[in-house]
Image (cartoon, rainbow, N blue to C red):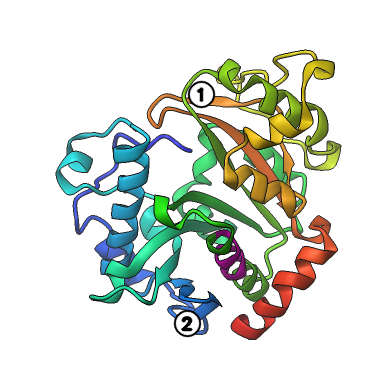
């Protein structure tokens, strides 16, 4: 998780002007990008849906997980920052719920493309990890930052994760994304509380030299916290958050070091997913849906 910028205006209409000025892609803006049973995945269509996604984020990050809120957030009950108007917001909706569509949102992901990030002065995760250096080593690749992922408690299932991945695959197929990156979080601010899982990641899931990325100087915390021979693989994997396990299943690798985010009360690791290195069975599994929805 990333720290919310203190200088950001998070009032209800703070993003309206920027949102109205965006060159929104007409092909996939608001179209279904995936569907599993009663769950539909698509991008937010309007300001009301972005606000509703921010409310879902608030319920998870602040009400449930205890992130520190500022005055605007406490008043509005929304998790919002200056990056929101520049991002695409992937939504999971339960189509069986009644009421307006923006009240059917049960999960969300924030997607920030490299060319859009350039207009904001960089990616959000650059405050924690040296993403700029990684991008500079791969000038031919188009990067996408995944962030602010959350799902309401009653929808935290494999089916919801798969629905989200359907949407992500359709999105990266449409925009010809070469590399997905982003932070994933462990709850709390004590890395040692996750020693077994972090040590396992440090020894078995690290990026190779071509894709290596390190936590920024001054915030770097080691992930290698116990003797590797003492790590129980099953216990380590079981202790990982579902999002981390989901990333690993599709072949993601983890950067060097973790970062303590005291605003969100999390220990953050950095995930790197070059699309061409994602496991073939997942490309086949999600790719068929991506072709159907993103054509």
Q: Of label 1 and label 2, which has the lower sequence position? A: 2
| Residue 243 percent coordinates (x, y) | 58, 47
Residue 14 or residue 201, whichever sits in front: 201
Please say whether residue 67 is one of the residues in the magenta stretch: no
At horizontal 66% and vertical 78% (from top left) the residue drawn is 289
Q: Nearer the viewer, residue 10 or 54?
A: 54
The residue located at (41%, 50%) in the rendering is: 153
| Residue ID for mark 1 | 260
Left-right relation of 269 to 12: right
Quadrant in which residue 264 is drawn: top left
Q: Nearer the viewer, residue 44 or 62?
A: 62
Give coordinates of residue 268: x percent, y percent. 55, 32
Quarter assignment of residue 172: bottom right
Give the image location of residue 82, x and y in percent. Answer: 35, 48
Q: Quadrant of the C terminus?
A: bottom right
Q: What predominant SS class does the magenta segment belong to?
A: helix
Residue 152 seen? no
The magenta stretch is: 161-168
Quarter of the image where one finds residue 70: top left
The correct choice, above or below, for 77 with respect to 278 in the image is: above
Secondary structure beneath label 1: strand
Name the secondary structure under disc 2: loop
Residue 125 in the image: above or below residue 12: above
Task: Name the residue that disc number 2 marks.
Answer: 31
Residue 165's x, y, as percent?
A: 61, 64
| Neighbours of disc 1 within 10 Å: few (<14), some (14-19), many (20+) | many
Identity of the residue drawn at 19% across and 50% down: 11
Question: Label 2: how many residues lie within 10 Å, few (<14), some (14-19) or many (20+)?
Answer: some
């Amino acid at each position: 998780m990333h720290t919310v910028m203190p200088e950001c205006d998070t009032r209800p209409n703070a993003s309206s002007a920027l949102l109205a000025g965006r060159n929104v892609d007409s092909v996939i803006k608001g179209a279904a990008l995936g569907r599993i049973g009663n769950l539909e995945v698509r991008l937010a269509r309007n300001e009301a849906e972005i606000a509703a996604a921010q409310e879902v984020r608030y319920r998870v990050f602040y009400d449930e997980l205890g992130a520190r809120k500022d005055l605007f957030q406490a008043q509005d009950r929304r998790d919002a920052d200056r990056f929101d108007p520049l991002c695409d917001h992937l939504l999971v909706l339960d189509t069986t719920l009644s009421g307006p569509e923006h009240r059917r949102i049960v999960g969300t992901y924030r997607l920030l493309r490299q060319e859009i990030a350039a207009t904001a002065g960089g990616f959000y995760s650059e405050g924690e990890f040296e993403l700029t250096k990684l991008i500079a080593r791969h000038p031919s690749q188009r990067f996408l930052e995944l962030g602010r992922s959350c799902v309401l408690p009653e929808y935290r299932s494999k089916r919801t994760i798969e629905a989200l991945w359907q949407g992500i695959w359709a999105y990266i197929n449409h925009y010809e994304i070469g590399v997905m990156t982003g932070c994933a979080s462990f709850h709390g601010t004590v890395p040692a509380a996750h020693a077994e899982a972090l040590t396992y990641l440090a020894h078995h899931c690290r990026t190779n030299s071509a894709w290596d990325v390190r936590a920024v100087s001054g915030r770097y915390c080691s992930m290698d916290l116990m003797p590797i021979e003492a790590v129980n693989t099953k216990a380590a994997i079981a202790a990982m958050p579902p999002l981390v396990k989901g990333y690993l299943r599709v072949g993601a690798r983890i950067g060097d070091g973790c970062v303590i985010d005291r605003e969100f009360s999390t220990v953050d690791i950095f995930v790197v997913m070059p699309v061409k290195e994602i496991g073939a069975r997942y490309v086949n599994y999600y790719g068929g849906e991506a072709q159907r929805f993103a054509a």
